Image (spheres, grey):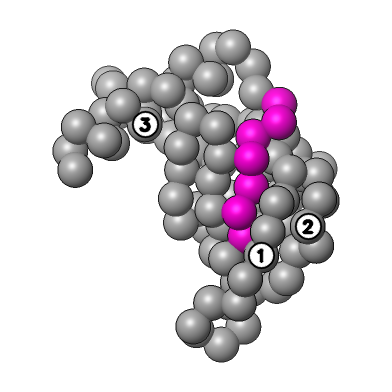
Amino acid sequence: MISNAMTGESMGRIGNLSVDGMMLITTHEVPDGCLYQVQFQLRDAQQQVQRMEIGIQCLWSEAARTEHSYWIGCKIVDISDAQQQVLDAWVERATETV
C-alpha cells in the first residue's frame, strides 16, 4: 500500500517500482502534473522494513481493465540520499530474481 504522507489516506498500491519512478494502481483518476508526498514500505536485504517517504509527480493516467481502477505513472522528484540507496538496492535485488 501507498499513502499520502500529508493526509494519511491510502492512494492505492504500487504496481511497478524503479529507481526513478513508479506506477500506482488506484481507484480514482489523478490529474497529470499533480505532486504528492507519499509513504510506503520496502524490505531491505536483511528483511527489515524500511519506511520510505518520497515526493512524486504524476505524469499520466489510464483507465485499467478493471472497473473503477486506474494506472498512474509517476516520477520521483524528491528523495533523500539514504532512501535512494535503499530503493536502488531493492530494485537491484528485485531484478536479480527475474
Q: Nearer the viewer, residue 17 or 27?
A: 17
**How far, Cα to Cα, is label 3 from label 1?**
23 Å
Q: Residue at the spot x=80%, y=62% of the render?
A: 31
Label at residue 26: none
Label 3 residue SS: helix
Tags 1 and 2 touching, CB below 8 Å: yes
Residue carrying label 3: 91
Which of pointers 3 and 1 lies earlier in the amino acid sequence? Answer: 1
Does residue 73 show up magenta in the picture? Answer: yes
In the rendered view, would you say 59 is above or below 68? above
Q: Residue at the spot x=56%, y=57% of the render?
A: 24
Image mark count:
3
Q: Residue at the spot x=46%, y=43% of the render?
A: 17
Magenta stretch, residue numbers: 72-78
**How far, Cα to Cα, is label 1 from label 2?**
7 Å
Which of pointers 3 and 2 lies earlier in the amino acid sequence? Answer: 2
* Direction left: furthest residue: 97
